[in-house]
Amino acid sequence: MDAIYTSLLKRARQTAEIIAQYKPVQPIVDQRLVEQDFGAWEGATLENVKKFAQDVALWQANALNIGPTQGESLSQMSRRKKEFCEVVFRNGGRRILIITHGSVLNALLCFLLNTPLHWRWAYPFDYCKLGEVALYESHCSLIRFNS
């Protein structure tokens, strides 16, 4: 393994640190691997989110382009993932472990496999499972999923 990239959120960092004990690489914390920013809805119960009823309706109708109240849209989140991929995968031939969150992995796979972001739920990652993507000059291949 040539590199370990992780979200800055605690559970991802802790997982990366455990794995790094057995590999000769130190985890690289990358802000772009953080989950979607749900703004005012972050950590709120469904009951609390109901006070944003108009915003919720707009978001449900167009989550790709409209974010939660004071949060980011799926398109905005996806741009962060695309930027991460373009920077990290620029140098081929490396084996990279990415430790992050389900929605982030969904967006990464959509970008890597050149599928529309609205298909993100076609890649339902289970907790603590591995996926493997092989990157080639002209395309990517999904080798393993939820292993």
Image (cartoon, rainbow, N blue to C red):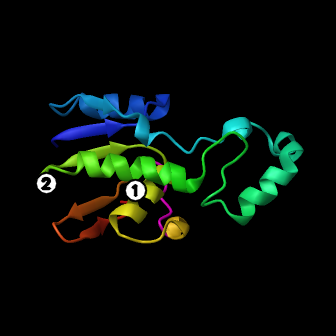
Q: Which residue is found at the position 23% from the left and 71% from the top?
A: 139
Whether residue 146 can be seen here: no
The residue segment tinted magenta is 122-127
In the depicted structure, whether residue 68 falls above or below residue 112: above
**Residue 10 in magenta?**
no
Give how far across and how far down residue 43 sits, in percent.
70, 35
Q: Which residue is found at the position 47% from the left and 58% from the top?
A: 106
Q: Amino acid at mark 2?
A: Gly
Residue 136, label in figure: none
Give how far across and how far down residue 5 sits, in percent.
31, 38
The quarter holding residue 42 reads top right
Main secondary structure of the magenta stretch: loop
Residue identified by numbered label 1: 108
Q: Crowdedness of circle 1 by 10 Å Cα count: few (<14), some, many (20+)?
A: many
Residue 92, label in figure: 2
Q: Earlier in the sequence, mark 2 or mark 1?
A: 2
Give how far across and how far down residue 62 sits, in percent.
68, 63
In-front residue for pair 118/146? 118
Q: Is residue 123 left or right of residue 1?
A: right
Instruction: Find out whether the residues at labels 2 and 1 contact each other: C-beta distance under 8 Å.
Output: no
Q: Which residue is found at the position 29% from the left and 31% from the top?
A: 28
Tag 1 secondary structure: helix
Q: Quadrant of the C terminus?
A: bottom left
Give how far across and how far down residue 48 sits, in percent.
85, 39
In the depicted structure, whether residue 117 falls above or below residue 33: below
Distance (Cα) linking label 2 and label 1: 17 Å
